[in-house]
Image: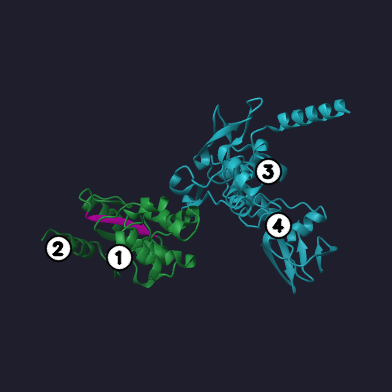
Chain colours: A cyan, B green
Amino acid sequence: MVNITVNSQIISVKEKTYILEAAKKQSIDIPALCWQPGLEPHGACRLCLVEIEKSGRKRMVTSCNYPVEEGLIVRTNTEEVVKTRKIIIELLLARCSTNKKIQELAEKYGVTESRFEKKEEDCILCGLCVRVCREIIGKEAIGFSGRGIYRKVTSPFEQPPQECIGCGSCAFLCPTGAIKIENGLNMRKIAEINCEIPLVFCQYCGRPIAPLRQIEFLKEKTSLPEDIFYTCAECKRKNYARRLIAMSSKR
Amino acid sequence: MREKEYLFNNANKIDEILVKHGMNRSRIVAIMQDIQNEFGYLPEKNLKYISMKLQTPLSQIYSIATFYRAFSLKPRGKHLVTVCLGTACHVRGGARIVESIQKMFDVKPGEKTKDGLLSLETVNCLGACALGPVVVVDGKYHGHITISRLERIVKGILNENKK
């Protein structure tokens, strides 16, 4: 265990945890868009900046990927931190001037107007979608392309990604709603990553369950009976209830 | 089955390059450099092939290919002129050099001439700032370049081609 001071509160946390996680446990609010429990920290959104003091020297670090050290002093709300954070929010607000989530964030931290040139992006390049696809799904269907102002999230060669199973984890984690899932009549579309995969329908009620490739992926991962993959949650529950009733009436 | 598809696409050459680097995925940049040198660009099919052979996700390879300016996903012209637009070269007139080459040979940065002989590219720094402005013509570095000198060099290589 390691003892650190966060906002003059002494807390002891496990070694190798990051400042942000330690602070969260003490319900100290540090904003972060690119951080997600279960994924490796990335330090991309820069919102989680805090001031640390080590042997008398102060500096600013991203708390999501700074591991705790014995005797570390962390301040999350100094004047300088608040000021810097506001500038970062201003920059985000300029990039995503029409994005609801970013507007809400800006409002929460008291930023109303951005002095920078306005753009109408939705993606903030936090990399959550890329990381979840790599670390959790293990497919790495999407990645970054280009660099600097040309950097963006896309599928290889901007073609339908071969590896994508259409699970939608990227859209689920996206903090700004830049990636959207669209379930059409027969297809699931995720336009931002050029994904289009046929949907599988419930064998009983005909409602869409999941994209075909996701079902194939789940079949590979588990050794469950075939039937389960082609039945929607609702019908599974009904079937189970019917079986229970049948069993009890036999008695 | 998938492998057969690639046999027609210079797979032998690519295999040679892969073997030369010991099929080592951590040498991916070097492998891609060799492919770039061989064909003048990175053919999509070859990238898919090395992704399969090295068991490296295509998204990673695509990221690398689009990150470095030395790589090109489109075929380049027979000759390549790369103008440095790093800070030092920029203040010493790099942008003007790009402009004049653009006018002289009717080619836009990142594209090639209609006859496919000349490609013009820009790069953000070549690390030779003291020599600025720097222009690389077919791999040869020219420091303290002037527009008239560059014109002579480029016309020289283009004329050689006609002979």
Q: Amino acid at mark 2?
A: Glu
Q: Which mark is residue A81?
A: 4
Reply yes or no: does residue B122 show up in magenta.
yes
Q: Residue at x 35, y 66 (%)?
A: B16
How far apart are the alpha carbons under marks 2 and 4? Answer: 62 Å
The magenta segment is B117-123
State the residue in front, B71 or A251. A251
* Residue in view at x 44 percent, y 59 percent: B53
Check if mark 3 and mark 1 are on a common chain: no
Real-space Cα distance between discs 2 and 3?
Answer: 69 Å
Give how far across and how far down residue A6 sits, in percent. Answer: 80, 61
- Nearer mark to the viewer, of 2 and 4: 2
Read off the residue under disc 1: B136
Q: Which residue is mark 3?
A: A224
- The quarter of the image holding the C terminus of chain A is top right
Q: Which residue is identified by label 2? A: B160
- Extreme residue in the front direction: A250
Q: Is residue B24 above or below residue A91?
A: below
> Can you see residue A78?
no
Q: Amino acid at mark 4?
A: Val
Q: Please, which chain is the residue tagged with disc 1 on?
A: B
Give left or right: position of A20 versus A161.
Answer: right
Q: Is there one chain holding both mark 2 and mark 4?
A: no
Type of secondary structure dominating the magenta stretch: strand
**Crowd tier of the residue under label 4, counting other residues whose Cα lies within 10 Å: few below 14, some 14–19, many 20 or above:** some
